[in-house]
Structures are given as structure tokens and as C-alpha cells.
Image (cartoon, grey):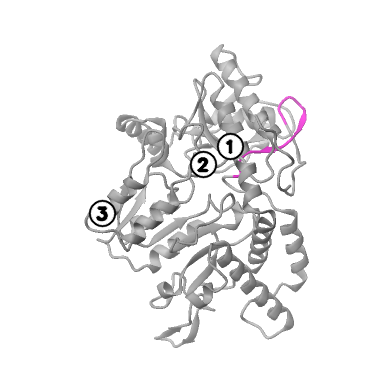
Amino acid sequence: MTHLAEPPARLVGEDLQVPCVDGVDRRYVNLDAAASTGAFPVVMAAVEQFVPMYSSVHRGAGYKSRLATAAYESARATALAFAGRGPDATAAGDIAILCRNTTEALNHLAYRLRLDPDDVVLTTVVEHHANLLPWGRMACRRYVECDEDGTFDTDDVVAGLDQAPRPRILALTGASNVTGWLPPLTAILEAAHERGVPVVLDAAQLAPHRAIPGEADYVAFSGHKLYAPFGSGVLVGPGTTFAEGDPFLAGGGAVDLVDLDEVWWTEPPDREEAGSPNVMGAVALEAALAELGRIGWTTIEAHEQALARRLRHGLAAVDGVRVLGPPLDTDTLAIAAFVVEGVDHALVAARLSAEWAIGVRHGCFCAHPYLIRLLGLSPADVDAYRAQVMAGDHRTMPGAVRASCGISSTEADVDAVVDAVARIAAEAGKGQAPPVPYVQDIATGDYWPVSDEPGWRGHERESGASCARG
């Protein structure tokens, strides 16, 4: 197997030491990049440098306000270019709206497309909830199904496009946040456009790992997955979509004139950004996008592909482990969702954290319909789980474990999780108990070690929602 050189970048906090239940502090291995990423050092530096100049945006004549406004608009232009729009994007009518995250961007777009309840939005069962739920509020949804391996092909999408009535839009992910699978975007975009159907691309998972195709009509992505944890989200699309009608948010900064009975909205994108914007987030986002550009997609993809092979093949070789998703040799992001025979997904994640200092995600990853299919659950299974959850019992909530790499991940990180999972699977196969007892919370389904070690004592347990929810 080809060995990697140093990763393309390091992140703030890479050397963080955290306590484990055996009393040993270990370097934290962050394999949860698909959820959120750490910060590039240049992002932290850009924010620190800008803090003294922080001021209101579009709202003041002072020198600091002018600097803040210029920085904010520079970030907007950089986001447009990152989304595959050329240097003449503004002249062509494309705009970038800065918001909180991808979820807000897609909700924003669903509202502003002025869909009728009987309009059809074609989407897929592979989607994150952010690209499922907003459309259901506004229109009818038609779904592209997936195979047992969690994939579909262009012909499956074409069948949905050609079904009457023709969809108003096609909304699909650029990369699965569960399996890392990459749909054939080029062919799908071409097929949709041949039929006059605009495409909304949820690029939240794609954007940190691959170039965004400029042919997508609308694009949404998030700074917190792009090594700018406090960064803004972005919605990119034709300005004509936002030129008429009420904006998603109403308030100051979105208007030219207000009377007690009337309002005259300003032009987009300002019309779509009511309230004081997150200028610090815009600065962070621009710095992160510039750093990704400096590193280059060729370097990023090579690193990603090597780690993906090592991670997926390594886990699949462990007895008792099943890797979900497409065949192992499929080109995917460096993400692996898996289950360990005989061990609850929440317990696997808890043990990786408490015993090995490895951070992963478990549960359904905000993609419940997709996980149901990947796990092969029957309607009766789903009904039983639903009844238990509705009764407040999350202990048997189905799910999987997800390990996901980022730009700073190393072969050693991948080997660490493979070795730890192999240990858990082997112990389960022999009927051996973990080195410390674990208790499960009925309300969350999460496990907690019974330990007197600092960091793991009972009173140090954080309260909150289940890690498996979404």
C-alpha cells in the first residue's frame, strides 16, 4: 500500500491531549471531520488580525466600518469563485448570500423559489435532512431510490426527471455525509439541464474535498466543514431568483424604504441578509477558502483517496465489522460508516472515545431514510423503533459508527481507529466485557463509562441531546 507523505495541512489543536479511563492522557484523534472541522492556523491568524478592525457592515461611514464592509464583500466574491463561478460571476447575475450554514441556505432557497404545494421537487433518499425537510414544507417530493449499497446512477435520476409532472427542481447532494459516496454529478447535471430542470447542489460534504461543479444552478455549503469553524454558510445562485418578493428574513439592512404600512426591499444580495451579518465568520471563511486554493485540489484529492482506501479496506478486513455503502474500490471521500456485530453503535463510539481518545460520530447522521436502507431495516423494524423512541426510550435506536478524515488526517489516525475497532470486535466475538463497565442513558441511548478517572467521573458528564439524533 502506498504510504502518504505529511498531510496537506495541520489544524489548530492537533496535539491536544485528552484523558482516558485507564488514567493515561492520549493525543486526541479527530475522525469526525464530516460533522465539523478544526481551524486552519491561517484562519485563526486572519480572525485575530481583523478583530481590531471589527465594526458594522454596510452601516457606517467610519474607517473601521469601511474596512469591515470591504472585508465582508471580499469574502462574498471569494465564495462565488469557490462555488465554480468565474471572475465575471457578478456580471452574469450570480450572487452569494452569506448565512449561518448549509441548512439555513437550503431553507432560505426553498422559501425564495416560490414553489406551489403541488410543484414537484425531485430529490434522493441519500440526502442529509437539510436537503429533505425544507422541500417538504413547500412542495411535493419525489425520490430517487438507492440500491442496497446506497448508490444510484444517472438513469435512476433521469427516470425521476421524466416522470410527469416534470420537477420544478432537482435537489441532490454532492457527496454523502454517511458513506462518502460521490454521485455522478457531471452526467446528472447535464441530464437535468437538457430537460430544463434547475439543480440545487448540497455541497456541504463535497466542498472540503472536491471542486464544486460550476454547472449547478444553486449551491449551498458551510464554513464549519471547511476549516473555518466560526465561518459563515453560503448560498449561491442567480440573482433573478431573489429579485422579487419578500426575503426569507425581514429586518434592517434588507430595505431601501419603510413606512408603517409598506416596505421597499433593496436589491439582492443585501435584500437576503437582514440584520447585522457575521463579518468575523466571513473573514474566517475567506481565509479558509484561500488556503484550500493554495493547497490545490490535486493534492487534496490524492490525500483523500489514499486515506479512503486505507480506512475502508482496513475496517472491512476486521472480522465482525460490516462497512456500509458502495464497493470498497469505489472512489469515495475518506469516510466509513460501519457496524460491529454484537456491539451497539453507541457503545462502540463511547469506547473509542473513553479508551483510545478517538472521536467519531454514531447514530443516523441526520440521514435517517438513508441509514434505514443501508442497514436493511424492514418496515416492522422501523415501526418498533419508532414506538420506543416516541415513548422516550432511545436505547435501541438503530444506527452505525462513522469515521471521517479531514485534510490533516494521517495514516496513523486511520490505523488507530482500525486497530481499536478490531479490539472491540474481537472482544465481542469472545464474549469479553470492556475493561470498565458502561451504563446507557434511556433518554439519549448514549453510553458512559463507570470510572473515577478525571474527565470521566459521573458528575463530569455533559447533559444534552442524544449523539445519535439528527
Do callouts 2 and 1 mark residues in contact (Cβ within 8 Å)? yes
Question: Residue 180, labelled with which disc?
Answer: 2
Q: Is residue 454 above or below residue 197?
A: above
Q: Nearer the viewer, mark 2 or mark 3?
A: 3
Left or right: 147, with 66 as reference point:
left
Q: Amino acid at mark 2?
A: Gly
Q: Which residue is disc 3 drawn over? A: 162
Q: Quick one: quadrant of the N terminus?
A: top right
**Mark 3 falls on what kind of element?**
helix
Q: Position of residue 59 (x, y in %)?
A: 62, 81
Q: Which residue is disc 1 drawn over? A: 308
The main secondary structure of the magenta stretch is loop
- Residue that appears at 63% across and 50% down: 298
> How far apart are labels 2 and 1 at the CA level?
9 Å
Q: Amino acid at mark 1?
A: Ala
Q: Amino acid at mark 3?
A: Asp
**Mark 1 falls on what kind of element?**
helix
> How many residues crowd mark 2 within 10 Å: few (<14), some (14–19), many (20+)?
many
Q: Position of residue 269 (x, y in %)?
A: 51, 75
Q: Earlier in the sequence, mark 3 or mark 1?
A: 3
- Residue that appears at 56% across and 22% down: 317
Do callouts 3 and 1 mark residues in contact (Cβ within 8 Å)? no
